[in-house]
């Protein structure tokens, strides 16, 4: 697939004031710390997962099982990062709020407050969203990513301890992550294609590291 700046660039396009618990589809990219290749290798344009790679794939597939109101779509594990689509379940892949205009300048919002604090959250309890008691709160996109990173880190740590997996350098994942709000069905399909074709384009990927 040819280079598409709407998909490949890493500039944050977070919308100021946007409610990330709102229904919609989101493209996310999460990189390992220092872009260390931990999950396998690309051979002839195909991703060959090691045990750790299968683990991060499994945890992704389990997201809808553990978290009501969250679904997942296309996904790929690469040697040092993952790409996937998270869907806050509702009326479809709608992204923009009914009021307010998106920030299309391509400039990041204040990054002094990253999406992920980097602190483990082992309680398994959703954030307090102020919803009526008895109604399951809707997780935000940062909640979903944070829990994914926490669970995969825990399982990888167990793999290092009991199965001889390669230790990671301090943290398994980078502190922050890249996300893009998918605005319509056409964009959703383009991003699905990009995700599926990612192993074929490994050597031209921004995260490429010569193993």
Image (cartoon, rainbow, N blue to C red):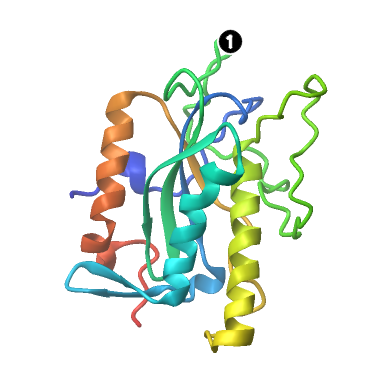
Residue in the picture at 58% in, 24% down: 22
Q: Is residue 145 left or right of residue 41?
A: right
Task: Measuring from the top left, give residue 161's x and y in whole percent.
Answer: 64, 85
Q: Name the residue at 28% across, 57% down.
A: 198
The quadrant holding residue 40 is bottom left
Question: Residue 101 versus residue 84: which sits nearer the camera?
Answer: 84
Please name whichever residue, 65 or 210, is drawn nearer the observer in this view of the structure.
Answer: 65
The residue wearing badge 1 is 99
Q: Position of residue 211 (x, y in %)?
A: 35, 83
Count the numbered circles shown: 1
Reply above or below: 15 against 54. above
Give the x, y percent position of residue 181.
47, 32
Horizontally, residue 171 falls left or right of residue 32, namely right
Q: Nearer the viewer, residue 29 or 22?
A: 22
In the displayed orientation, state which residue is furthest to the top: 99
Asked if 140 appears above or below 197 in the picture, the reply is above
């Amino acid at each position: 697939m040819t280079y598409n700046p709407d998909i490949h660039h890493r500039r944050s396009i977070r919308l100021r004031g946007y409610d990330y618990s709102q229904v919609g589809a989101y493209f996310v990219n999460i990189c390992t710390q220092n872009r260390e290749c931990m999950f396998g290798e690309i051979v002839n344009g195909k991703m060959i997962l090691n045990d750790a790679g299968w683990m991060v794939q499994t945890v992704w597939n389990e997201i809808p099982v553990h978290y009501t109101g969250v679904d997942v779509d296309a996904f790929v594990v690469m040697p040092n990062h993952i790409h996937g689509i998270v869907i806050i379940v509702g009326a479809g892949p709608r992204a923009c709020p009914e009021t307010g205009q998106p920030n299309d300048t391509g400039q990041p919002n204040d990054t002094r407050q990253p999406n992920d604090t980097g602190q483990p959250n082992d309680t398994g309890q959703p954030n307090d969203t102020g919803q009526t008691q008895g109604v399951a709160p809707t997780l935000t996109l940062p909640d979903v990513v944070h829990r994914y990173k926490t669970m995969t880190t825990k399982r990888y740590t167990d793999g290092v301890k009991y199965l001889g997996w390669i230790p990671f350098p301090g943290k398994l994942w980078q502190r922050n992550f890249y996300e893009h709000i998918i605005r319509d069905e056409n964009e959703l399909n383009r991003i699905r294609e990009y995700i599926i074709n990612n192993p074929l384009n490994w050597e031209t990927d921004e995260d490429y590291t010569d193993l």
